[in-house]
Amino acid sequence: MRYLVSLALLLALLWLGISGVYKPLLFLLGGTSVLFVVWMSRRMDVVGVEHNPVLYSWRLPIYWGWLVWEIVKANVAVARAALWPDRHLRPQVVRVPVRLATPVAKVTYANSITLTPGTVTLLLEPDFIEAHALLESTARDLESGEMERRIAWLENRP
């Protein structure tokens, strides 16, 4: 039950922060939306110890900040490659081992790869991720395992 309450509070705070409009009708619609999402989450059995919405607490904004910086750097690299394709483009498929324990962490890893320009997750298996990298530098970044270490830190796991 506490996970449902924490999910409802987190969604309500997120909705209030993003909407910026505080009128009775919108409060009603926002509250209804939050209750519907909580109900659906409970019905789909995706809320619990492993999927606790406050599990990441203060670590999540730090990870997002790091990921946004990586996205900016990748945007610059892809723009450079688009302007001078003969010097930078080295498309390749890389297979990266995954040592993350939870399915949520693995999906976060795969989504983070796809969010970063120049890389796309092609296949997510329990012990590896197959990704397409447009540039040699992005392939090396994936193989370095830095993103996986950040996600392990996000989950507070060694």
Image (cartoon, rainbow, N blue to C red):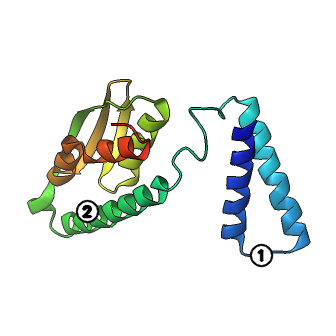
Q: Nearer the viewer, residue 134 or 73?
A: 73
- Residue 56 left/right relative to 75: right
Coordinates of residue 49 in the picture (x, y in percent): 60, 32
Q: Classify 10 Å Cα crowding around label 2: few (below 14), some (14-19), many (20 and above).
A: many
Residue 20, located in which quarter of the rendered image? bottom right
Q: Nearer the viewer, mark 1 or mark 2?
A: 1
Quarter of the image with the N terminus is: top right
User: Which amino acid lies under the numbered mark 2 shown in the image of this protein?
Assistant: Val
Residue at position x 37%, y 58% in the image: 67
Residue 72 is drawn in which quadrant?
Answer: bottom left
Disc 1: CA contacts within 10 A as few (<14), some (14-19) or many (>=20)? few
- SS of the residue at dot 2? helix
Q: Is residue 110 left or right of residue 99?
A: right
**Residue 112 image position (x, y, % from top left):** 40, 48
Image position, residue 93 (x, y; %): 23, 38
Secondary structure state at the residue bearing disc 1: loop
Query: Which of the numbered marks, if any, corresponds to residue 78?
Result: 2
Q: Which mark is residue 21?
A: 1
Query: Which quadrant does the C terminus fall into?
Result: top left
* For marks 1 and 2 on the same chain, the one whose residue lies earlier in the sequence: 1
Q: Which mark is residue 33?
A: none
Residue at image coords 85%, 65%: 27
Give the residue displayed 28% in from the left and 61% down from the top: 74
Residue 83 picture quarter: bottom left
Nearer-the-camera pick, 101 or 118 = 101
| Residue kind at label 1, given as amino acid type | Val
Residue 127, compared with residue 62, is above or below; it is: above
**Label 1, label 2: how many angstroms apart (C-alpha)?**
37 Å
